[in-house]
Amino acid sequence: MLCDRCRQAGHRRIGPVITVLLLLWGLAPAAWARFQIPPPCKNAYTVEQEQTEGAKFAAEVFKQMPVLPDNSPLSQYVRNLGAKLVDVTPGHRWPFNFHVVASDEINAFALPGGAMFVNVGAINAAETEAQLAGVMAHELSHVVLRHSTCNLTKQQAPKMWAGLGQLAAGVLLGGGALSNMAAQGIGMVTGLGFLKMSREDEKQADLLGTDILYDAGYDPRGLPQFFETIQAKYGAGGSEWLSDHPNPGNRMQYVTAEIASLPPRSKPTVTTAEFTRSKALALKEKVYNSKEVEAGAWRNSGRYALLPGGPPTIIPAAAGSQTAAGASGRLAQASLGLKDNLSAYQGKTFTMSVPSSWQKGEGDNGSVAFIPPNGSGQSGIAYGAIVEGARFKTAVSDQNALTQATSAIARQLSQDNGGMQQVSDMTTLTVGGQPATAVELRGRSPISDGNNALPERDLLITITRPDGAVNYIIFIAPEADYPTLKPLYNSMLQSFRVH
Ligand code: ZN
């Protein structure tokens, strides 16, 4: 930071001298009048608050989006690129951290406090490393200039932070598999007002971003080039990035003027071999469109980090086994784990015995999936059980309330899964001493016979909790395999205990 100040002070001293000389020669002044960081905007948040709350928000992004784990080569590349930019970034030393999201959208966003998420789609769209570094330098600039918290201050929404902190709890209580809750989460992440920048914010981030790009040794034209690419591909309003970062109208003009004001450099970096290698990886990386991100089937793939720096939570039984169900159809009876010993799984809110060969994955805020090897593919879980929690406005304390809660959950599952139908009466039972209900549903399996989805049979069990919330279990199988699995599902259910 000190060095930046020194350098900028130096330019200020040199500037007028050169201007005078140029004027004497009758030329337009071309002083190195680089962008000066404006005085801090009015901000109701301390730097510490911004970092703490921003980190909470970043943790939520990991739950709502497929973020590649830190050890993926693509994440490492983006992290190294980010570090080069951070080295020359002025201002407070925010705890910057960089991540890659397996989304096809050309987007990158930085959260207050310094977490930055770059989509695979943005890496694919960049033609050079300078272009990718350009959009990252622009995002870094929003963090440095504290635009998000200044916007929040302007919107007089100091309670917003509380809302963000509670988002994780909201998703948990709503039931993780209920994807409209997840969708709201996404809305919070990508559409929050404070991530929408004003034209003045944009201009500042463009100018500071250009300078950061230049100071890091890159060809600063990478920044406007990348924005032209996005605009060409999506039009003015068609991308999330452009809607959050509106073109003030004369972006090219003022960025070009800023570049012209920087001292010429003989060999700025345009691109690198690492970029070429990483882009090849990015083109091969499985990506999701925004609907698929919301639907959340990626959570079952085991490929993504659910925490900053965290490992994927579902460990595949064997490498390459993940897509088998989607591709190859029903599982052989021998691989369903029917003869396995059952071993107790201790969850945060429940205990249940499951076949020892099944994979266990904590999918989202306490929800847990139990899946036989190869029982899930990229389009969803075909075999196994999911346990979730849900809380309703009023406590679920009697059978009547439980029946209503079960109907609500069944309705939501039906909405989320393309119209499941109830195919049995709702029956009451006791699970681990707690009142419970059972109902069978019929839907479409992620497995197809080549042309059409196979029919699926699901057993939905809703169990009251002593705290007034409910746990529910969805046992899943293609209809043809349901009779075979039903005794196992019954054994699992009998072992279920809330705590
Ligand atoms: Zn911006």
Image: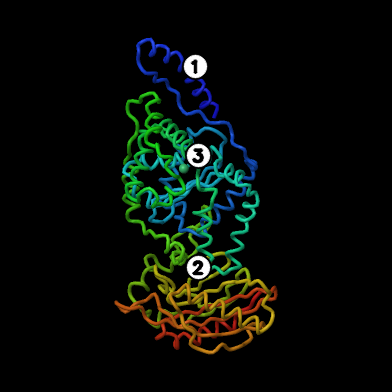
Please give the residue where the numbered disc 1 appears in the rendered image. 13
- Quick one: label 1 or label 3, which is nearer the N terminus? 1
Q: Nearer the viewer, residue 422 or 59?
A: 422
**Residue 364 quadrant:** bottom right
Spatial CA span between label 1 and label 3: 27 Å
Residue toward you, 223 or 476: 223
Which residue is the extreme one toward the top?
A: 24
Within-10-Å neighbours for mark 2: few <14, some 14–19, many 20+: many
Query: Residue 260 location in percent, x, y?
Result: 37, 26
Q: Amino acid at mark 2?
A: Ser
261, above or below 276, in the image: above
Q: Residue at x 52, y 32 (%)?
A: 90
Circle 1 crowding by C-alpha within 10 Å: few under 14, some 14–19, many from 20: few
Q: Looking at numbered disc 1 in the image, what kind of residue is underneath it?
A: Arg
Marked residue nearer the N-terminal end (2 or 1)? 1
The residue that disc 3 covers is: 201
Q: Which sits earlier in the primary sequence, circle 3 or circle 2?
A: 2
Q: Is mark 3 within 8 Å of ligand 1?
A: yes
Image vertical order of residue 463 relative to residue 103, above or below:
below
Q: Nearer the viewer, mark 1 or mark 3?
A: 3
